[in-house]
Image (cartoon, grey):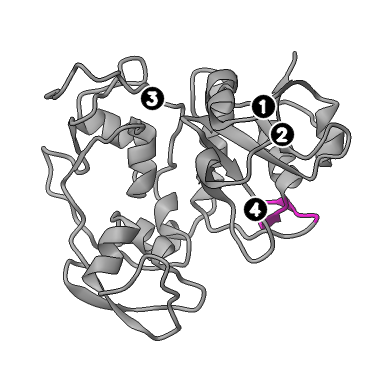
Amino acid sequence: MKTINKSHNSIKLAFALVSGGLATQMAGTAIAHADTATTVKQGETLKSIAKDNHITVKALAKANHLKTSAKLTSNQKINIPDPPKTHTVEQGESVSSVAQKYGLKTSDVLKWNNLSWSNSTIYIGDKLNLQDPNEPQTTDTQNTDSAKSTATSLVGNTQAERIVNLALQFANQGIPYVWGGTTPAGFDCSGLVQYVFAQNGISLNRTTVGQEQNVATTDVSSVSDVINNARPGDLLFWGSHGASYHVAIYIGNGQFVAAPQPGQNVDVENVSNYFMPSFIGRVVA
């Protein structure tokens, strides 16, 4: 893979994998051909349609002369632009974050760029292939029922990788926040954490305060504190010790997966765009 501007610091892959087929699940939107109008279904958003069609929210909004914050309405007609073939790496990006941005599998992006989990360093200015350069990419959904499957898989060489990968799979399924929810039908914040860790053989308590008892903690007060101290697979807590009110799974590169609040779905968030967590929690064997 061609590299540009190697004087910049390399960006390491933050363990992440967007599960195959899951990016097309959020609202059952069939992937459209370029320049084809599609009808918005109830509950769909610019973000969900963009992920379904392997484009960015910005590109979708631009194609329809909308703001990225625009709300869609049922039966609204919007145009789907052609998915890009390449992406130019920007500061702070990893292979996994680029894949997640376009609703692709990290493993595919690695393969299409002659990279691997053990050799995944990319540089600012690199052009990453977003389609298989050896095979024309079809944009038709052949099996809608299959695309709506909610199957998940444990992928990764380490426990931390498997935790992060599973959390990211759930972040691409449009799973709603449900107070007290503990299954993929609906999660609250601690229910998501408990479920993901349980699938990886780790038993955690049910509530945020209870989960504090399962970890060794490190206080943080800035974004740099989080990035410098948290490891993929760690937990982030909001609130004081013994009275935390929110918890999330850190996935690396300043990002985390969480069930945010009523009316929102399980999603990937960035520490710099969110309320600062109070402390990091690391499960101790």
Q: Is residue 88 magenta?
A: no
Of the image marks 4 and 1, the number of the one nearer the N terminus = 1
Q: What's under tag 4, amino acid-wise?
A: Pro
Crowding around mark 1 (Cα neighbors within 10 Å: few <14, some 14 to 19, many 20+) is many
Q: Which residues are magenta?
A: 180-188
**Mark toward the viewer: 3 or 2:** 2
CB under 8 Å between discs 2 and 1: yes
Q: First in sequence, mark 3 or 1: give its number.
A: 3
Name the residue: 31% across, 73% down.
Answer: 66
Which one is in front in this view, the residue at disc 3 or the one at disc 1? Answer: 1
Give the residue type at disc 3.
Answer: Leu
On the image, numbered disc 1 is attached to which residue?
A: 220
The Cα atoms of the two marked residues, 4 and 1, are separated by 20 Å
Q: CA distance from mark 4 to mark 2?
A: 16 Å
Can you identify the residue that label 4 sits on? Answer: 260
Q: CA distance from mark 3 to mark 2?
A: 25 Å
- Total number of numbered labels? 4
Indicate the secondary structure of the residue bearing disc 3: loop
Residue beneath the point at 28% across and 29% down: 110
Amino acid beneath label 1: Val
In this rendering, does residue 205 appear at all?
A: no
For disc 2, the marked residue is: 278
- Compared to residue 192, the image places residue 34 above or below, namely below
Nearer the camera: disc 4 or disc 1: 1
Residue 227 left/right relative to 109: right
Whether residue 67 is visible to the viewer of this picture, yes or no, is yes
Quarter of the view holding residue 139: bottom left
The amino acid beneath tag 2 is: Ser
